[in-house]
């Protein structure tokens, strides 16, 4: 039996941010063969007592006992740190990430937007930093309670300062094996920049428009004016990517429109944040891509107007949120 | 005394649309030396019985008896037909205008947006068609009741198919005299295209943004994101005007920002229409300028996105309005 000990050693994961993304993927990994440590804040007591509950289109399940942590100080060093916070909380990361990485540990950024891998790469030393792009409709239904509505595959790609990409690395394959064992479909991509920009082709129109026009994906796509805006914004994002050196075929546009039509009516994450009076991920999804495009000589006027519209609504929204908290 | 009969003969005005604009200017003209006939629809009975009431920053007044008409058929032919309907009701005009014009009669279009003078010119025969651009904050407070909040001057310019403008015509001077006698400040302009586009430099950003972002002029201008959007949109409108052959100096932008800052917080007319679930003047203020610019080779991406956003919100709004009326 001793000869199998090494291969039976559990791979360890740290999940930073146990919400719609971290809670879902973390729970799947914990249900399989991995040892998963969850960093929690507000939900700590609840999860410590009741574990995690996942209502999923692929089958509901409950994990009555999980490794819950209130602070990174009680967490062990892990093989992989999954970053699944909202990007609006990324100021926490420089303190947390380095202390959680095993000698050969890697970071996977499961967040929206652009630029976070580069940021983390700057203080993660020699540890590889990957993007884990989640194509999923999921929400947090309550404390320790995730609702998975549709999709769920993950695209993994490793960050490299070289625009031609890092290729398929052993660390990506290792992580992908864990994910696949947990029932998560993984696509390995050679160039992180391309997949990040491709995801923005969907995120930039749908997140912003759902907030500004107070609507859902299905309404946006069913009206000619909505389709027209989406297509125009997608074209601008593709132009922005091209300026930055990442070539995306325009046929991605009809493909994404079709995919959204077959999707259930959905509130993108930014719409949910807005409705809950939380800060929106405007910097990661709009400001960073706009800055990257501008540095490469491309102005994206529609995206830029949407960015200003979101900043305007966010300012009014937070003023209201402050009003609420000061009344409490 | 007989020698003065002719000069004492009252100049006659027909007012089509007795709302915030037609009600205010028509009442001022009726209070002075003109004979004014008001075409009314829903407010006919009220105005017939109670006349018109104007609450104005320049002094309140009531006209207990006015020439109220339920139909153009009872109206006499007039020297001037003032068109002050919403442009969304312009389908009525081809039937009404020709029957109301004296042999030397003229039309004054006191509406927002672009393209109406050209449209009316096509069926007004040899009658001159002028634009009467109203720089005014006024609302309809109730049946036959106008609330005038700020400003009030009118820019008159005559339509000409020649882009260099019609110059200052005798008909403009005649109309201006009536207006000035009624206490209305008039500015005569040589080129209708330029003044129409200049007005769009204000109307396009403020009307649309107040609807899309559910806000007022003062909020828009007080946040950096709001100012940035306004300036970017204004620049695009100026570029559209230039493509169409109308040169507008960019210094109009700081001038207009200053003017709006000194204005009382204001809901532009499109915001009021939207809130009241009425159709918005999207065609006149957005579609016509966009088409004119496009025909001249200029795409205005921000204006175009705002146009789509407004069409989207209008479709949802009217669906709601239909839902309401079908429930009654």
Image (cartoon, coloured by chain):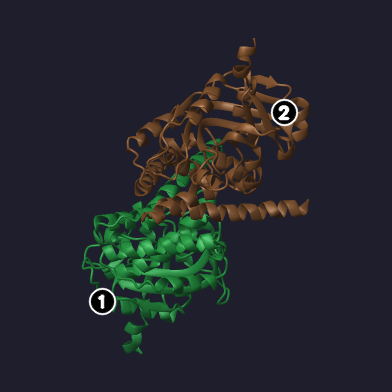
Chain colours: A brown, B green
- Which mark, by number, is residue A67? 2
At 41% across and 75% down in the image, what residue appears? B34
- Does the residue at mark 1 contact the one at mark 2 (Cβ under 8 Å)? no
Q: Which residue is mark 1?
A: B167
Q: Nearer the viewer, residue A204 or B244?
A: A204
Which chain letter matches label 2? A
Position in image of residue A26 (x %, y %): 62, 28
Q: Nearer the viewer, residue A234 or A172?
A: A172
Instruction: Name the residue furthest front.
Output: A3
- Classify A273 as above or below B24: above
Q: Secondary structure at mark 2?
A: strand
Position in image of residue A328 (x %, y %): 78, 50
Q: Secondary structure at mark 1?
A: loop
- Classify B145 as above or below A298: below
**Could you give the CA–CA distance between mark 1 and mark 2, rounded to whole angstroms?**
82 Å
Q: Where does the N terminus of chain B fall, quadrant-wise?
A: bottom left
Q: Is residue B190 left or right of residue B147?
A: left
Which chain letter matches label 1? B
At 47% across and 46% down in the image, what residue appears? B313
């Amino acid at each position: 039996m001793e000869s199998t000990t090494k291969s039976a050693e559990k791979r360890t994961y740290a999940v930073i941010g146990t919400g719609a993304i971290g809670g879902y993927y973390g729970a799947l990994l914990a249900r399989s063969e991995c040892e998963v440590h969850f960093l929690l804040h507000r939900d700590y007591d609840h999860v410590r007592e009741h574990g995690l509950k996942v209502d999923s289109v692929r089958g509901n399940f409950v994990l009555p006992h999980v490794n819950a942590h209130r602070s990174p100080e009680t967490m062990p060093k892990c093989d992989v740190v999954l970053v699944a916070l909202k990007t609006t909380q990324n100021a926490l990361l420089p303190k947390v990430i380095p202390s959680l990485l095993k000698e050969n540990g890697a970071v996977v950024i499961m967040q929206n937007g652009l630029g976070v891998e580069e940021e983390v790469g700057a203080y993660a030393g020699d540890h590889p930093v990957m993007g884990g792009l989640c194509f999923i409709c999921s929400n947090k239904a309550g404390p320790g309670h995730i609702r998975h509505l549709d999709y769920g595959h993950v695209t993994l790609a490793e960050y490299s300062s070289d625009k031609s990409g890092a290729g398929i690395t052993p660390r990506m394959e290792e992580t992908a094996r864990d994910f696949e064992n947990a029932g998560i479909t993984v696509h390995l991509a050679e160039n992180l920049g391309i997949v990040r920009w491709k995801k923005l082709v969907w995120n930039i129109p749908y997140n912003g428009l759902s907030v500004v026009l107070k609507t859902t994906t299905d309404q946006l796509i069913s009206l000619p004016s909505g389709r027209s805006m989406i297509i125009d914004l997608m074209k601008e994002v593709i132009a922005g990517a091209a300026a930055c050196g990442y070539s995306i075929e325009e046929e991605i546009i009809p493909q994404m429109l079709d995919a959204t039509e077959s999707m259930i009516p959905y509130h993108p994450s930014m719409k949910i944040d807005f409705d809950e009076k939380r800060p929106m991920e405007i910097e990661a999804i709009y400001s960073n891509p706009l800055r990257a495009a501008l540095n490469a000589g491309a102005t994206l006027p529609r995206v830029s107007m949407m960015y200003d519209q979101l900043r305007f609504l966010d300012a009014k929204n937070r003023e209201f949120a402050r009003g609420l908290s000061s009344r409490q």
